[in-house]
Amino acid sequence: MIGAGGIGFDVSEFIVHKGTSAAIDTDHFMREWGVDLSVAHRGGIQGVEPEVPEPAREVYLLQRKASKVGKNLGKTTGWIHRTSLKNRQVQMVPGVTYRKIDDEGLHVTVTPKGAEQGEDRVLPVDTIIVCAGQEPLRELQSDLEAAGLPVHLIGGSDVAAELDAKRAINQGSRLAAEL
């Protein structure tokens, strides 16, 4: 997975799951997170071992920034996404420079935070999913404005880097109220 923003995390979560999702099955969710609904264990969790299913596939979640992978996820839910992927053995790799793709896999250089030189690695992958490099496409904006039509930029059209659903929904709601 090239790109460890919110979309990269969501897609990684999707592809490591097999079978019924814990998001739609309460019993499955409670087993996966080690919660005892009968409260036979202290606090409903003490002494309960989570039952994490085997991942459907091996996944590398890669980001260019050397900072902690998932650092900019939601303050109250980011830990859940990181933990869920960690429990499914997703390898989260920061400080990645992408070099090439060939029959051997994805060739990268990994430079840990603070290091001056990186380590070249070949990830033996057969599938690469890109969830990175958002750039706003605004070609239509100038044509519409030149034609005298009103244009409103919201969400990824406004600021594509570090897409933020909350910001996009806020902008869309405010614009709808104004119109």
Image (spheres, rainbow, N blue to C red):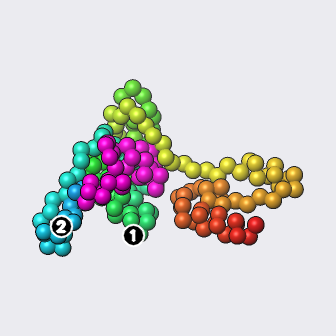
Looking at the rendering, in which quadrant would you find the C terminus?
bottom right
Report the amino acid beneath label 1: Thr
Residue drawn at 54 percent across, 61 percent down: 165
Q: CA distance from mark 2 to mark 1?
A: 26 Å
Which span is picked out in magenta?
A: 1-30
Circle 1 sits in a helix, a strand or a loop, which is it? loop
Q: Residue furthest front?
A: 38
Sequence-earlier tag: 2 or 1 = 2
List x then y, in percent, for residue 77.
Answer: 38, 65
Q: Amino acid at mark 2?
A: Ser
- Please give the label number shown on residue 46: none
Give the foreground label among 2 and 1.
Answer: 2
Q: Position of residue 98 (x, y in %)?
A: 45, 41
Magenta span has 78? no
Tag 2 secondary structure = loop
Q: Which residue is mark 2?
A: 38
Is 23 included in the stretch rendered in magenta?
Answer: yes
Please name the residue that numbered disc 1 is placed on. Answer: 76
Query: At 67% across and 69% down in the image, what residue appears?
Result: 174
Which residue is at the far bottom? 43
Q: Position of residue 158 (x, y in %)?
A: 65, 59
Give the camera-side residue of 65 and 142.
Answer: 142
Q: Is residue 86 left or right of residue 76?
A: left
Query: Residue drawn at (60%, 68%), measured in percent from left and top?
Result: 170
The image quarter containing residue 106 is: top left
